[in-house]
Image (cartoon, rainbow, N blue to C red):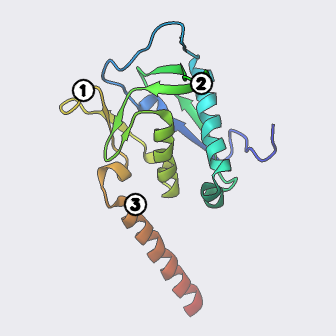
Amino acid sequence: MSSSIPSDGSDQVVKIDLSAYRHTGTGYRPTGNDYTFPGPEDFLKSLSKHFNKQLASDPVLKAEFGHHYHVKFTALPTGYTVVKHKRPDKTQDTEIHGNFSGIGSFVSAPQFLKHAIAIMRLDLVDSLELRPEFLKQPDRLECECVLCTRSTAEASWIKKKEDQEAKRGQQESGV
């Protein structure tokens, strides 16, 4: 194990509990020999590995987060089907079958990871919350994080942080 990976108890380990996510519809549940269903722990390890690999390999994300964060997914969405999907080129891809909706629609783990990165950028990791959206689309979820509930949230948050930093800089230079 690399020494750059912090221990579970470290403040640098961002734990995202996906069990708060509920799937309210039937979803696509493939059957047959082309699909295998890994256990939840294997899938969570794979998801965490994929996420951390993405953080480490993307130059922009690496510059932003560096080794400050190591993400560990701790539970699966309730009622979601996790599959290893066999691609036409015979490679396999792990997928979550189910839908997220909000300002954006997330239909796969990689799409959701991009959303989680956006939340991490704004230091909003603990505000991930999804609830069923029964009236509009019973097989979807509505994300209740600030990025999805307010279209101007990201710009507002960044402006607020910039204002705080400018004020802090003025206080330091004026005192």
Q: Please rate how many residues cluster around mark 3, counting C-alpha atoms within 10 Å: few if below 14, some from 14 to 19, many from 20.
A: some
Residue 89: mark in rendering: 2
> Does the rendering let one see residue 88?
yes
Work out which residue is located at the far top of the displayed protein and give it: 32
| Tag 3 secondary structure | helix
Q: Residue at x 49, y 7 (%)?
A: 32
Which residue is labeled 1 in the image? 138
Residue 146: mark in rendering: none
Q: Please rate how many residues cluster around mark 2, counting C-alpha atoms within 10 Å: few if below 14, some from 14 to 19, many from 20.
A: few
Looking at the image, residue 141 sits to the left or right of residue 33; the answer is left
Q: Amino acid at mark 3?
A: Glu
Mark toward the start of the polypeptide (1 vs 2): 2
The foreground one among 122 and 111 is 111
The quarter of the rendered structure image containing the N terminus is: top right
Q: Are marks 3 and 2 in contact (CB under 8 Å)?
A: no
The foreground one among 53 and 91 is 91
The foreground one among 80 and 90 is 90
Q: Residue at x 44, y 76 (%)?
A: 163
Mark toward the start of the polypeptide (3 vs 2): 2
- Of the residues tagged 3 and 2, which is closer to the observer? 2
Mark toward the start of the polypeptide (3 vs 1): 1
Looking at the image, residue 39 sits to the left or right of residue 118; the answer is right
Image quadrant in which you'd find residue 25: top left
Q: Residue at x 41, y 64 (%)?
A: 157
Work out which residue is located at the far front of the displayed protein and give it: 89
Work out which residue is located at the far bottom of the displayed protein and give it: 174
Report the Cα–Cα distance between label 1 and label 2.
34 Å
| Tag 1 secondary structure | loop
Which residue is labeled 3 in the image? 154
Image quadrant in which you'd find residue 37: top right
The quarter of the rendered structure image containing the C terminus is: bottom right
